[in-house]
């Protein structure tokens, strides 16, 4: 199943995408794709969507704003340096264990919403990533099989970053990751059964039509199930939590000389099975 939310910010309604032309409105069945929804599981929704599809209750949603496919989560967790080549381009060692940092949940925006440069920013940067959405409460998972069972689906994300805030302002990375609009997500959440091999997803990111990042999840150091099992040993994951799993090479920080986002730039992201995004970069407010 492909879950989407459409409508204006704060008033999105949940729909299920059958394909690019056909959608099933489920807003009368589901309040939102939020913690309670994921905790309850998707069996009822699958049955309802199958029945409505069979009955021809299919519609189009051309031209409407697409929101993030999940409601604001309890937390956004991020894995750093999870692609070998990206670790090398940033001059850092390949990690022995996943590097973890957090990102404010209110950074979440739609896949085509504007990304706003924060005040005082000098080094805004891009990061295409595979996002994991948690499907049930998960603490001390026994193994990676249990972790797989705790994954509701996958989503394309842009882990937008401000490198000066992240690296030059002391302490942890969170300051450079939590600025408003810094986590575009979507257009849809794909449930695991829609993805043949989550470790074989190609991805690209273009800035103003110029290819900057090319990668595949095959290059990940730590797989999604490894990450979910690992994190559950340190904290309780909640249904609807989002985990950004790290970015492949080609970020502005890794270029020589480095290149940073400018007002007016356009970021276009694409990942196999997870759709495309397009964000305009806008000036500080
Ligand atoms: Zn990242």
Image: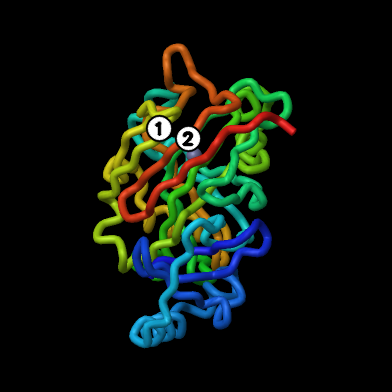
**What residue is shown with label 1?**
206
174 or 255: nearer the eye? 255
Q: Which mark is residue 267?
A: 2
Instruction: Provide the secondary structure element on which disc 1 rests.
Output: strand
Q: Position of residue 22 (x, y in %)?
A: 38, 69
Q: Is residue 118 left or right of residue 167?
A: right
Q: Quadrant of residue 247?
A: top left
Query: Is the residue under label 2 in contact with that under label 1 (CB below 8 Å)?
Result: yes
Residue at 28%, 51% in the rendered image? 199
Q: In the rendered image of this protein, does residue 31 appear above or below residue 206?
A: below
Q: Mark 2 or mark 1, which is nearer the start of the sequence?
A: 1
Image quadrant occupied by the N terminus: bottom left
| Number of numbered callouts drawn | 2
Residue 206 in sight: yes
Instruction: Provide the secondary structure element on which disc 2 rests.
Output: strand
Q: How is the image coloured?
A: rainbow
Q: Count neighbours of disc 2 (C-alpha within 10 A) and say few if under 14, some if 14 to 19, many if 20 or more.
A: many
Q: In the rendered image of this protein, does residue 80 appear above or below residue 34?
A: above
Q: Count neighbours of disc 1 (C-alpha within 10 A) and say few if under 14, some if 14 to 19, many if 20 or more.
A: some
Q: Quadrant of residue 274?
A: bottom left
Residue at 44%, 24% in the rendered image? 90
The yes-or-no answer for disc 1 within 8 Å of ligand 1 is no
């Amino acid at each position: 199943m492909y879950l989407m939310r459409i409508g204006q910010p704060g008033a999105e309604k949940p729909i299920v995408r059958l394909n690019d032309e056909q959608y099933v409105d489920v807003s009368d069945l589901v309040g939102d794709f939020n913690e309670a929804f994921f905790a309850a599981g998707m069996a009822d929704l699958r049955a309802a969507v199958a029945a409505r599809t069979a009955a021809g209750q299919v519609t189009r949603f051309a031209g409407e704003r697409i929101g993030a496919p999940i409601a604001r989560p309890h937390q956004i967790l991020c894995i750093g340096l999870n692609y070998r080549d990206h670790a090398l381009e940033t001059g850092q060692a390949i990690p022995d264990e996943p590097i973890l940092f957090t990102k404010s949940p209110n950074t979440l925006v739609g896949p085509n919403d504007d990304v706003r440069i924060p005040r005082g920013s000098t080094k805004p940067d891009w990061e295409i990533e595979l996002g994991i959405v948690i499907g049930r409460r998960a603490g001390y998972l026994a193994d990676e099989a249990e972790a797989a069972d705790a994954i509701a689906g996958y989503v394309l994300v842009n882990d937008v970053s401000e490198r000066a805030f992240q690296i030059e302002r002391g302490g942890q990375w969170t300051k450079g990751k939590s600025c408003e609009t810094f986590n575009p997500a979507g257009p849809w959440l794909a449930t695991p059964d829609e993805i043949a091999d989550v470790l074989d997803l190609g991805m690209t990111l273009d800035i103003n039509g110029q290819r900057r990042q090319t990668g595949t999840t095959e290059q990940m150091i730590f797989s999604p199930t490894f990450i979910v099992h690992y994190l559950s040993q340190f904290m309780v994951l909640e249904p609807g939590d989002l985990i950004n799993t790290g970015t492949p090479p080609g970020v502005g920080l890794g270029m020589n000389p480095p290149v940073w986002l400018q007002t007016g730039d356009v970021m276009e992201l694409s990942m196999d099975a997870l759709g495309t995004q397009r964000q305009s970069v806008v000036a500080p407010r």
